[in-house]
Amino acid sequence: MSIQKNQQHQFRINYQIRAPEVRVIMPDGTNRGVMSVREALELARSLQLDLIEVAPTADPPVCRIMDFGRFLYEREKKERAARKSQKLIEVKGVQLRPKTTDHDLSFKIRAARRFLMEGNKVKLTLRLRGREAVNLHVAHQMVEKFIAGVSDLALVEVQPNIEGRAMIAVLAPTPATLAASRLKSTRQRIEAERAADKAAGYDEELEELEEAEEDEDVEQASAQQPASETAQQPSASQGEHEQVRRSKEEIAAARKEANRKKIAQKRAEEQFGLP
């Protein structure tokens, strides 16, 4: 009710109209021409309808003859349809490493293309560890190859730049890609490609979970690094560093396997309706 009252205050009707002359639009949409506001009011009254000022800034102002309640209803209906057609743009993350193989990179490019085709932005993060930060040309080449793989669908919103120990870039869908994202054929194509990649061993949901856990590991390692490295660096040999690296890789592999089991269990529960 309050929304309707606010809308009523946006329009002048009948004797609230102050202009001496107005252009009159009839209920069927025909243009009756310019007449005095008195004549327009008499015409509206003869039809048992309202005279509504719909374009007050025009010269002369444009008024429409119709039922004011129906006018508000049609206007609200159009606004609801416009809000429904609007799409909330999300930012989807894709993570790379300098050691990412061409095979894995192709899957990640395909995933990014699907995100863009859905009308979302893509935040590309290439993480650098240890001495990888020294060879930035390798990271730049991989990022440029990734961007080239989606260049027909995206614009580079944020150019590749170094933030901490990562190279970041943000890609946004082009206007044509946004328009196509609303098509049913586009959604069907996305689902077909997603199913094909999953059958080939690439699971977007699993990748997202693993990347989130990797982010958490990186944050924890960054917080603990100064104290641990200061204490161990003088006495640590190259063999000990290699042993620590292998232990971390084994832990990461075990965590990924546990994540795969969790997702498989979750899907089984959803499929068979288990509590």
Image (cartoon, helix red, strand yellow):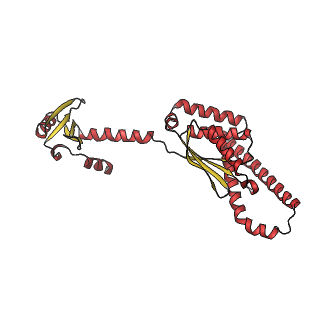
Left or right of 88? Residue 46 is left
Look at the picture and state if 238 lies above or below 7: below
The percent position of residue 88, horizontal first and vertical second, equals 49, 45
Question: Residue 92: horizontal and vertical position, in percent?
Answer: 59, 46
The residue that appears at 63% across and 31% down in the rendered structure is: 192
User: Can residue 51 be seen here?
Assistant: yes
Tell me where residue 161 appears, x and y as whole percent.
61, 52
| Badge count | 0
Residue in the image at 17% along x and 39% along y: 22
Q: Quadrant of residue 225?
A: bottom right
Image vertical order of residue 208 relative to residue 26, above or below: below
Q: Position of residue 193 (x, y in %)?
A: 64, 33
Identify the residue at horizontal 84%, vertical 69% (top origin).
234
Q: Is residue 274 visible?
A: no
Q: Nearer the viewer, residue 59 or 89?
A: 59
